Image (cartoon, helix red, strand yellow):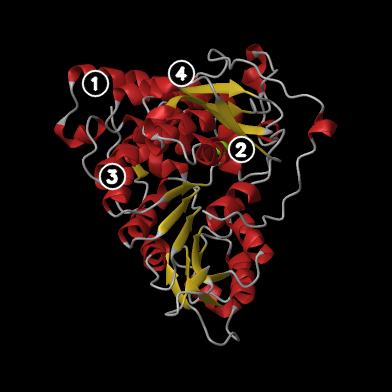
Amino acid sequence: MRLCSAEGFADRTVMEGIVILGSTGSIGVNTLAVIRQNPGRFSVEGLSGHDNVALLAQQIREFRPKQVAIGEGRGAHLQALIAELRPQPEILEGIAGQCRIAEAPSATRVVAAVVGAAGIKPVMAAIRAGKTIALANKECLVMAGALLMEEARRRAVRILPIDSEHNAIFQALQGAADNSIDHLTLTASGGPFRRKPSAEFGSISLQEALRHPNWQMGQKITIDSATMMNKCLEIIEARWLFDLPAAKIKVLVHPQSVIHSLVTFRDGSTLCQLGLADMRIPIAYCLGFPERIPSGAGWLDLAALGSLTFEEPDPVKFPALRIAYEVLALGGGAPAALNGANETLVGLFLQERIRFTQISDILQALVARLRVIGETGAPDEWQCLQEVRQWEDAIQADAWGRAFALRQATEAVTGTSTRQRSSDGSAETRVPT
Ligand code: MG
């Protein structure tokens, strides 16, 4: 970043301070790869990880942040791994630690790459501290998109989407007036089961579901791609990021993942962004914005690809797409409840405790239950399902969804009910009925 001197001319180069929340995950590792491509431009002020202490230690050695955060109870282990470093970074733990580094005065940009609902508090802390947010955590927008965008507007904070589809839309919208959009089209690879007959879905193994045809990603999002819940969450994400009604957000299956999404304007023009399926491209856009900086990714060779294909999504085989519009219509805490339930179910599937098809079966049961609550009214303690007035409501609705999913999954196996901790691990929640 170049700053002007008193004489009015750029006479020195100042490194831009960056904090990466979730630096040991797939987006975090790719963010550091882009920073490596741009020596002298960025200074890494803070890093956070959850349980990959060894990788975080390695990143600390290379990038020398002033502050780091690791999961609860892991600080001493991390400290031991970097004991000889001078100066030592301040080592913090848990969500409170992440909130502290999100507010680091020396950073102007915060990359929010923590997976799941755990990312919501640090993102809010970064917005309140006035940081530009490079947002990879879609769950924040799914759970409380209206609140997050309102808070960002109030503090004049820019939210730059890292998610490749939303990043493509954001790029295509540069220079466009708000009233010029007719609709958005999110592209979807269709995941590994696009061609699999639904009759065979019952026997899908964890290994098959973890094999994404185009993208190398973390486990949670890879399973979400296989169920197409990822696209469901992205529809909700787009609704808030671009402030458009759900009816103006469409999905198109594009198996090659070359066109990352499209914007259609009132005049009939459609703009899109193309690139290799490499997350370093949207990450570099968010790190450099409004400039474009090297990402380290290769160029697209369209002649070598030869052709791009498109098809309508199948909402019968993938009910997740329908669910997105249903929870948006229900409003209130319904998207947050859906998100919590999905995280729980993906976790159970990754532990091979439920079948692949149980994920969407239980999510559909959750939507049916939410619809009944919407018609009959929620008990006082679950008002959060009908109205999200503050962040805590979204977190409570998320916890309701988790408990609902866990109860349904447990009953399917044992016929018993159970209890579960809330998303931030701070309180135990009663299992809903
Ligand atoms: Mg995406």
Where is residue 298 drawn, in percent x and y? 76, 48
What label sits on residue 374 in the rendered view? 1
* Label 4 residue SS: helix
Circles 4, 2 touching at the beta carbon (< 8 Å):
no
- Report the residue marked by disc 4: 322
Q: Which sits earlier in the primary sequence, circle 3 or circle 4?
A: 3
**Front residue of this view, candidates 232 and 179:** 179
What label sits on residue 400 in the rendered view? none
Q: Residues within 10 Å of mark 1 (few under 14, many from 20)?
A: some
Image point (73%, 24%), residue name: 308
- The three-letter amino acid code for the residue at tag 2 is Thr
Mark in the foreground, 3 or 1: 3
Furthest residue toward right: 304
- The three-letter amino acid code for the residue at tag 3 is Glu
Question: Compared to 418, does 358 lie above or below?
Answer: above
Q: Residues within 10 Å of mark 2 (few under 14, many from 20)?
A: many
Q: Which sits earlier in the primary sequence, circle 3 or circle 1?
A: 3
CA gap, disc 3 and disc 4: 27 Å
With 122 as the anchor, is 76 left or right in this view?
A: right
- Report the residue marked by disc 3: 150
- The three-letter amino acid code for the residue at tag 1 is Gly
* Label 2 residue SS: helix
* Label 1 residue SS: helix
Q: Dividing the image into four quarters, tell me where ligand 1 lies.
A: top right
CA gap, disc 3 and disc 1: 25 Å
CA gap, disc 4 and disc 2: 20 Å
With 280 as the anchor, is 286 left or right in this view?
A: left
* Label 3 residue SS: helix
